[in-house]
Image (cartoon, rainbow, N blue to C red):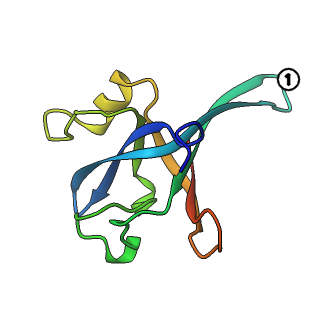
Amino acid sequence: MSDTLFGDVVTLYNHYDGKWYRTVLTGVQWTEKTTKTVDSDGKMHVNPEIGLTVPYRAGYVLKKEYVGRGFTFGLDNLDVVVLGCCEAEITDDYTITDLKRDYESAATIYTVSDNTLRPLLKHWSVSAK
């Protein structure tokens, strides 16, 4: 894979059975965008979103088979991704709320597209906010 396109590093936090599991993924592409909407009262809402392209790699586990080993996406709609190698461990004393407060880039995954059956550039496309 090209270092130009896939030169980012992210830390993925998977939630399973009341615990958080941390996985660092290298060679990914992180993009940020902002969507703006106007409600019926004329109030503008600004919503940052994250796009993450993760080229296929060993270690992926289907979410229904995930038991804390490997990595998956979108488990219980609670999984969180952080830009960079984040050393923080989620515990009773340091919660996911603390992580989101301390790391501006922390975002909750809300959708995943599995494109691993394509003949070229097998990947997962992940959206978070």
Residue that mark 1 sits on: 42
Q: How many marks?
A: 1
Name the image quarter holding residue 11: top left
Residue shown at the point (24%, 52%) measured from the top left:
21
| Above or below, 11 relative to 76 | above
Closest to the observer, 25 or 102: 25
Residue placed furthest toward the front: 2
- Residue 110 in the image: state x and y as whole percent: 54, 52
Left or right: 29, with 36 as reference point? left
- Residue 80 in the image: state x and y as whole percent: 40, 45
Name the image quarter holding residue 113: bottom right
Left or right: 99, with 27 as reference point? left
Residue shown at the point (37%, 66%) measured from the top left:
60
Residue shown at the point (47%, 36%) measured from the top left:
8
Q: Secondary structure at mark 1?
A: loop
- Residue 94 in the image: state x and y as whole percent: 19, 33
Closest to the observer, 126 or 85: 85
| Above or below, 37 relative to 16 | above
Name the image quarter holding residue 33: top right
Residue shown at the point (46%, 59%) measured from the top left:
74
The amino acid type found where label 1 is placed reads Gly
| Above or below, 67 relative to 96 | below
Closest to the observer, 122 or 60: 122
